[in-house]
Image (cartoon, coloured by chain):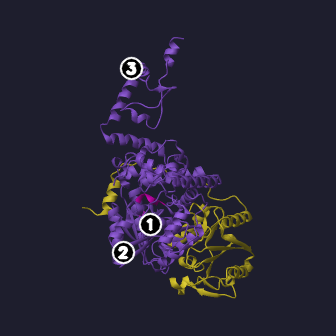
Chain colours: A yellow, B purple
Amino acid sequence: MSDARTEVLARIAAIPREPAPEPSRDYRVSGERSADEVVELFCTRAADYRAEVVRVDAAAVATAIVRILAAHGAQRVGIGPGLRSEWRPAGCELVDESALDVAGLDRLDGAITGCTVAVAETGTIVLSGSPEEGRRALTLVPDLHVCVVMREQIVELLPEGIRLLGPLVRSEGRPLTLISGPSATSDIELDRVEGVHGPRRLAVVVAG
Amino acid sequence: MKVSPFPAAAEHELANVQLRRNLRAATDTIQSKRARVVAELPDWEALRDAGSEIKADVLARLDELLVEFETAATAAGAHVHWARDGAEAGAIVARIAREHDVDEVVKVKSLTTDEIQLNDVLATAGVRAIETDFAELILQLDGDWSSHILVPAIHRNRTEIRDLFARTIAPGIVSDDPADLAEASRVYLRERFLRAKMGVSGANFGIAETGTVCVVESEGNGRMCTTLPPVLVSILGIEKLLPRFDDLEVFLQLLPRSSTGERMNPYTSLWTGVTSGDGPQELHIVLLDNGRTRVLRDEVGRQALHCIRCSACLNVCPVYTRTGGHAYGSVYPGPIGAILTPQLIGIENASSLPYASTLCGACYEVCPVKIDIPRVLLHLRAEAVRARGRSAERLTMRIVGWTFESARRFTLAQRVARTAQTPFARGGLVRRLPPPLSGWTRSRDLRAVAKTSFRSWWAGR
């Protein structure tokens, strides 16, 4: 008896198949909106999925975060080791997530991260495990996720975003998480409930 | 495995009023949400074309792409296993659990693992698999099984679920508000996520170029299972591959809009091998055949392997929206199940499924990867007849065919029928024929043969 790998590959190889033509790609790969419209669209779409969206000047990010944390009563907040200092809010306990185990993450009230890219058409933010975003569990275990999106990180269409992410995966194998609103379920009679296992609240601070 | 005949199962399900009411409300809602977000995209048809053509390319180069995927995933630190069938895949997962001395695993909702009855295999090996998708948990707690690909517990209402939770994971719960029920499951599962030593998932996509695995979900249970436990096993049907990372730009637009009717689902996770200090440090990927190469052998039927399990075809199907998923007797219900199941397990084991359709074509219209389901259904009906061999139906059809072949025999048959129908025809309809023809009129009327045919009217004008 041959091994499974050899046999599965042999089963496939034995099937006559015509080569398929190069797939057509006539869909949109670059947007047509102005930069302002793209930011506007992102904010609307992210809010559509019940993310809390605030727009501030680049210099006012930390102040906006302080307000969000206060509104949610978040005291102990996790951050990636590389979160830039001008985003770090005053008046709360900031904990470097890289020093925490899962139980430690579970004792946090929230997490603050940057992002890698954001997609306006779908209201999506993408994290890729950079020092400013921390590891994946940071934005999963605590109940509040505050994500700072810089205006120039927002692209209009998903293909634009995917094409920016490709190199990170190909060269570094970075793990990606695409987030569109807080976790949700519609499993009971299709009533949407926000907040199941992931953070129940997602706040997006759009800067610039 | 053999599935019970659709007509009998459907008759039983149709008597369940609760099921029909829930199902209709749910499918109508999802269907209109889908239509709304699809209409938003000016290039939807171009995306469907691309999706269909990329999948055709995957099937044409499947062996080459599997090896490419294996090489890339291995280079990124994953262990790649191959399984000819469900038993082999189950044994691999059980062995990994045993090696780590694990007796409990947390699981992401996955049709592929349902298909191979992984939970039973693991239970036999002394490993308890905890379903963590809300609906799957409900079904698991009640020993029930899925009736819809996307919303598996759609046949249960909130009061039933509250009572179930009160009996099982949340003694004393009184509220049947979905938010409170979701909270009960959150509390129950959270400690299990945090202590889990091993996670098990399926996969929506595997990227050949990079060895990346992709899971698309809403609740966050998928992220929990694929990032918190130190060991992760993902089972990937061999048809789930996409050639290049950039192909996600097509499929991550097609899938959420077709499935939940959202522009994007809340969470999509993509991981490429092991990342030091982040997520599982031991990663296994099981590449599963389990009948897929059999489907690939059929030139017409192989397009069923394009399927990305969105469930849009269920929500528009006039048969599914009435009978629900249980009537199909398989993990894959609805129009896609009617063409996929008979091919995966052999037409002789599911010969009634290709008939569970009116051939209206609504499924084809909404399919994001353009599977021509009506065409495959017809193709499989022919296969089913061939597989049955000699039968009264086949003989009758042969005689009918022979009669219709010649104008003379046809005219003669009309004349005979005109006389023979007299005791049965009322108001131009034959409502009941005597055996052996009664099968035809049991669920439909037959139009009576007219007094005068067009040809004889024309000739005598």
For marks 3 and 1, give the CA distance.
60 Å
Q: Nearer the viewer, residue B362 or B44?
A: B362
Q: Which region shows up in magenta?
A: B236-243
Q: Chain of mark 2?
A: B
> What's under tag 1, amino acid-wise?
Gln
For marks 2 and 1, give the CA distance.
20 Å
Query: Contact, CB < 8 Å: mark 3 with mark 2?
Result: no
Figure quadrant of residue B354: top left
Is B282 inside the magenta-drawn segment? no
Q: Nearer the viewer, residue B452 or B71?
A: B452
- Give how far across and how far down residue B245 sits, in percent: 51, 63
Residue B207 relative to residue B91: left or right = right
Q: Chain of mark 1?
A: B
> What's under tag 2, amino acid-wise?
Ala
Which circle marks residue B262 in the picture?
Answer: none
Say above or below: A201 vs B329: below
Residue at x 74%, y 65% (from the top left corner): A36
Residue B433 relative to residue B222: left or right = left
Q: Chain of mark 3?
A: B
- Residue to which mark 2 is pinned: B97
- Residue to which mark 1 is pinned: B140
> What's under tag 3, amino acid-wise?
Arg
Helix, strand or loop at mark 1: helix
Which numbered disc, 2 or 1, marks the residue closer to the eye?
1
Q: Earlier in the sequence, mark 3 or mark 2?
A: 2
Which circle marks residue B409 in the picture?
Answer: 3
Q: Nearer the viewer, residue B345 or B26?
A: B26
The answer, for residue A179, to whether it is visible in the render is no
